[in-house]
Amino acid sequence: MNRDSVLSRQILTYMLLLTFTIIAIAVLGSWFFYSFILDHLPGGAVAGDDEQMTMWDWVWIGTATTISLIIAIFLTIKLSSRILTPLNAVASSLRKISQGQLDARAYCASSRLGEVNHLVTDFNEMAEKLQTLDIQRKSWNAAIAHELRTPVTILRGRLQGLVDGVFEPDPLLFNNLLKQTEGLTRLIEDLRVISSDGGAGYTLYKSRTDLKGTIQDALDTFMPEFKRNQFTLKTELREQQCVFDPLRINQCLAVLFDNALHYSTSRKLIVKNGVSDKGNYILIQDSGPGIPREFHDFLFQPFQRDNGARDVNPEGCGLGLSVVKAIMLAHGGDVTYTLSKQNHSIFKLTWPDA
C-alpha cells in the first residue's frame, strides 16, 4: 500500500479502535461493574446470586450502551470532519468555478490524509490551468480581432468606395484588394496551423526528399530581397535525403528568412544543414544583435513580440515563429533559439528521419 494512501488506513484504524473499545467496555467493564457491586454495595452479593435481571443489570446495560454510543459518535465525527472539510471546500470551489469564478480555490488546513491533500492540490492545479487557459483565450480573441480588423476595414472601405462610385474600377485597385485578401488567407492559415495542437488539425505530406534542394529553393525565392537589403549569405549545404514535408519546411524557412530581413541588423546570414544525435537539422544564424534573454520563453507563443520587434516592424503580428513551432512539432521535432557567445541569433530546426 502506498505510504500516501493513509485514508483507508485511518478508516481501518478508527473502526478497529471502535471495535476494541466496545469489546473492552463489554468485557472489562462488566467484570469491574459486577465486582464492584458484589464487593462494595449493600445487597450486591444477593444481586449477584439472583438469576433474574435486577436494577443493577439494567443500570450496567444502559451505562455501557451510553458510553459506547458516545465513543462511536466522537470517533465518527472526528474522522468525518477530516474527510468532509476539504471535500466541502472543493465542492464549494467547484460551484464557484461553474458560475464563472475561475479564481476560486479550495483552501483547508494540511491534513494527515494523503489522498485528501492530493485531491485539494490537484483541484487547485486544475483551476489554475483553467484560469490560465481563459486568460489566453481572451488574449487570443483580442489579438485575432486586432489582426483581422485592418485588412477587413481596408477591403470594406475600398468595396464601399466602388459601390458609391468614389473609386474607379481599375486593375491597380483590384490588385490591392487581392493582396489584402491574400493577406487574410495567410493569416487564417497561420491561425489554423498553430491551433492544430502539433499537427492534429492538418495533414503533412511527407516524402523522402533532398533537403539541400528544399533549402536552396527557399533561398532562391528570397534572394532578390537579400540582395536588395545587401545581405551577405554563407551557405554550408550538403545533399541529405530525409523524410519531411517539403512545402511545410519551405514555409518554416520563409518565416525565418523574412524575420531576418525585417529584424536583423547585421546583414549577414549563415544557413547550413546536417545530421545530429536528434536527427536532421537546419541551422540559420545571423550576426546579431540577438533577442533579449527575458523574452526567450515567449518567443514561440502566438502574438508575442518584444518592444524592439514592434518598433522595427509595426506591421508584424507575432504569428510566424509559432507557426514554425507547430510545423516542427507535427514532424515529431522542434525548433529552438539560442544565443552564441557573440550574441548571435541561432535558430535550429530538428526532426527525426521517420
Image (cartoon, rainbow, N blue to C red):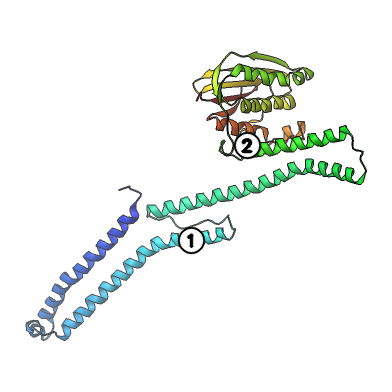
Give the residue drawn at x 17%, y 86%. Answer: 55
- In the image shown, does 89 or 95 lie closer to the viewer? 95
Which badge, 2 or 1, is on the more N-terminal residue?
1
- In the image shown, does 175 or 274 lie closer to the viewer? 175
Query: Can you give x and y, in whole percent of width and height, for residue 205 in the image?
Result: 58, 29
Give the residue drawn at x 33%, y 67%. Answer: 76
Identify the mark at residue 53; answer none if there is no mark.
none
Residue 222 visible, this orientation: yes
Task: Assign a secondary structure to mark 2.
Answer: helix
Query: In the displayed structure, does residue 15 sit left or right of residue 250?
Result: left
Residue 218 location, quadrant:
top right
Query: Can you give x and y, in whole percent of width and height, for residue 211 in the image?
Result: 59, 19
In the image, residue 26 sits, relative to residue 55, either above or below, namely: above
Q: Which residue is mark 1?
A: 91
Which three-letter amino acid code belongs to the residue tagged 1? Answer: Ala
Residue 299 visible, this orientation: no
Residue 248 location, quadrant:
top right
Label 1 environment density (alpha carbons within 10 Å; few <14, some 14–19, many ≥20): some
Which three-letter amino acid code belongs to the residue tagged 2? Answer: Val
Query: In the displayed structure, does residue 217 sit left or right of residue 129?
Result: right
- In the image shown, does 3 or 336 lie closer to the viewer? 336
Extreme-left residue of the structure: 49
Labels 2, 1: front one: 2
Query: Can you give x and y, in whole percent of width and height, for residue 219 in the image?
Result: 69, 19
Give the residue drawn at x 59%, y 24%. Answer: 348
Query: Can you give x and y, in whole percent of width and height, for residue 346 in the image?
Result: 62, 23
Residue 303 location, quadrant:
top right
Cα distance, mark 2 to mark 1? 38 Å
Q: Which residue is mark 2?
A: 193
